[in-house]
Amino acid sequence: MRDEDYMRLAITEANKGTGLTSPNPAVGAVIVSSTGDEVIAKGWHRKAGELHAERDAIAKARELAGGKDLAGCTVYVTLEPCSSHGRTGACTDAIIEAGFSRVVYGTRDVNPAHAGAADDVLRAAGIDVVSGVLEEDCVALIRGFSKRMQSGLPWVIAKSAMSLDGRITRPDGEGQWLTGTEARAEAHRIRAEVDGIVVGGKTVRRDNPSLTIRGEAYREEKLQPWRAVLTQSGKKSIPAEATILNDEHKDRTLLLEDVSLEDSLRVLADRGCNVVLLECGGVLMRQFLEQGLVDEVAMFFAPMLTGGVDFGFGVGEHLKKSMAIEKMQLTQLGDDILFRGLVKR
């Protein structure tokens, strides 16, 4: 197998940690034998404060090898190994102590505490270092972490469900849902990727949502996302009986009164949120888009024309300029279609 093939295995490992590792990035590692033809162990980062992917893979490899060192082996890591000491020891130390002869990583870390330092540390120990393997894919793994580290803002996904005529509501008496069960299950899987959810006060008053991960998408090791409610009519306008103020996760609910959209995102970033999901109404969604605060869209389209009252981006309003979407993915979910892509900068 080539370096790219082993890095793909490491990316698969990293994806296991998507949505779990905040404020840390999701990282995967694969250890390959000195002959280059055998995978000895795989590892991934599960949670802040727990073993980093390299140390997880090393621990598994040593268990399988009866405690022997890994001299001559290669470790593939999606992210540059850390070289500073946090709650766990530096991964460069673990790599050197294990006796690896080669390190291959996907992308450089953006954390200024050790960005770019691993190459010098490892090469000084006589280890061959290769970087930039499947870099684009590895960068995508840590997009939320990178944006928060560089800008103080989380990666923002705008999610909505619409009819073919652009409405996000149905006429009175027809029920709440536009999409079917498969699309709604996928919406929970998207929630499982994020660390926070933003809605407006109107959404809470109208729908009384729980804004939690449910169904097959829920994992016990995953903290329910922070729930930020933006209100301009005062915190008292949020009903005292609202689910998000009374359920078992009420301590993860934030009522933000008269806070700018950017500052609301900074509040969540300060709580370690790498990725935030917008589930707000059309007017608020449009404002986030117009202010350049959205990085990705996930739009569900239902095969119906509803003529409902609320449009996806506000009644009688429109974006001040068009926005191109790139790296599009279309997924059919029952009768519905999910359109997912990145806002082109």
Image: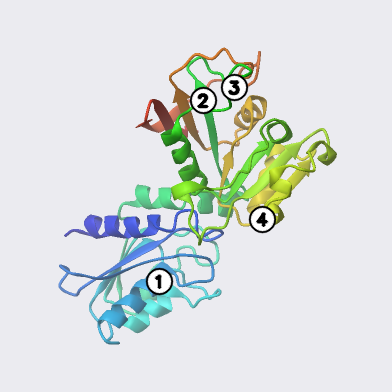
Viewer-nearest of discs 3 and 4 = 4
The residue that disc 1 covers is 120
Image position of 231 (left or right of 24): right
Cα–Cα span, label 2 and label 3: 7 Å
Residue found at x 19% / y 75%: 34
Q: Earlier in the sequence, mark 4 or mark 2?
A: 2
Cα–Cα span, label 2 and label 1: 55 Å
Cα–Cα span, label 4 and label 2: 28 Å
* Labelled disc at residue 178: 2
Does any portion of residue 99 appear in the rendered image? no
- Label 1 sits on what residue type? Asp
Q: Give the colour scheme shown.
A: rainbow
Secondary element at tag 1:
helix
Secondary element at tag 2:
loop
Q: Earlier in the sequence, mark 3 or mark 4?
A: 3
The single residue placed furthest to the bottom in the displayed view is: 67
Q: Is residue 219 above or below residue 123?
A: above
Q: Earlier in the sequence, mark 2 or mark 3?
A: 3
- Label 3 sits on what residue type? Thr
For mark 4, does the 10 Å Cα neighbourhood hold few (<14), some (14 to 19), or many (20 or more) residues? few
The residue that disc 4 covers is 248
Residue 131 in picture, x, y percent from top left: 33, 60
Secondary element at tag 4:
loop
Secondary element at tag 3:
loop
Residue 256 in picture, x, y percent from top left: 76, 43
